[in-house]
Amino acid sequence: MKNTTLLMKITLLFLLFFLCEKNFAQTPTSIVVTPSPTVLNIQNLLFGPDVTVKNLTINCPTAAYGTFTGTGSGIGLNSGLLLTTGCAIKAQGPNNAPDEGCDNSAGGDNCLENYLSNNGTSCVIGGACTQAGCNGTSTSGSVCTCTSCSGNNGGKSFDACSIDFDIIPTCDSLKINYVWASEEYPEYVNSNVSDGFAFFLSGPGINGTACNNSINIATVPGVGTAVSIDNVNKNKNSQYYIDNKNTVAGGTQYDAFTKVLQAKAKVTPCQTYHMK
């Protein structure tokens, strides 16, 4: 029986930072996972010469993260970092086991909980009625304010996995190519479970409404909401959705995943930013 959580057992992120686009073979081979890389392994894999990274910390159970190679897997990324809420090794394909996963009995993430409680929008109670996610309003004179925001009513998260780091770019923009996947597709779409994640960015010139005045730069393209099972599925934003149910085409155990998406943000060169 599954737990009702914001972060289910083996939701994963395939991350590839600051690399050029490449074309990959489509042969359906499995991704290959190497669990529990060191901080130095992660820095060497993800970051190029145009950025300086400091103070990288891993906030995951030991089995929950890893590196992967994915050439020919159908994932769309050649290599990257794998962050899960279960066991990273179980991300390897094919998709031959229903409800695969493991329970790390770990805590959640307050920043993500607060963000997803607004349905992955920047909705602020007391803000404008026209903001995304506002579902209750009050008008006084000619001023309309938001009195409630849509979301999961403060749901609790479990088995969170993240990395934190300071980043000093020499360029004026940051870009992250990623794939997001879930074993909760499709049966938990629009239920009490809300698989989701975020890339929180804070620093000079950023005054967001997420944790520590950060913004989430990983959102559904053209929509602005969080990437989650409710916001990307066969019926909603389906152009970004790949169904891997009962197939080996994706080279992974997960029932569905996104196409390669890109998180990006404008930054000031040579200034220090923080990412989570």
Image (cartoon, rainbow, N blue to C red):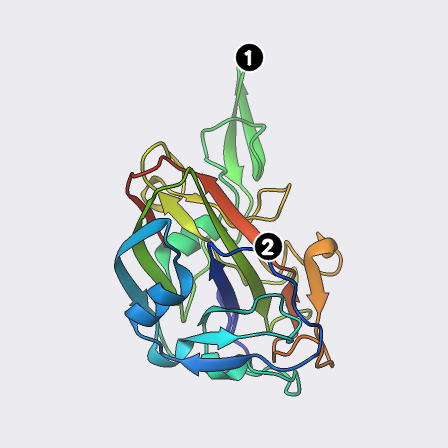
Tell me the residue that label 2 is attached to: 261
| Residue 109 in view here | yes
- Seen from the viewer's position, the closer of residues 130 and 37 is 37
Q: Is residue 73 above or below residue 134?
A: below
Please identify the quadrant where the N terminus is shown. bottom right
As drawn, the residue found furthest toward the bottom would be 96
Q: Mark 2: few, some, or many residues within 10 Å (few <14, many ≥20)?
A: some
Tell me residue 68's x, y (percent). 49, 75
Q: Is residue 155 above or below residue 36?
A: above
Tell me residue 238's x, y (percent). 73, 56
Mark 1 or mark 2: which comes first in sequence?
A: 1
Q: Which amino acid does label 2 sit on?
A: Leu
Q: Is mark 2 on a helix, strand or loop?
A: strand
* Residue 246 location, quadrant: bottom right
Q: What residue type is labelled 1?
A: Ser
Q: Is mark 1 on a helix, strand or loop?
A: loop
Q: Is residue 52 above or below residue 247?
A: above
* Residue 170 location, quadrant: top left
Report the disc number at residue 28: none
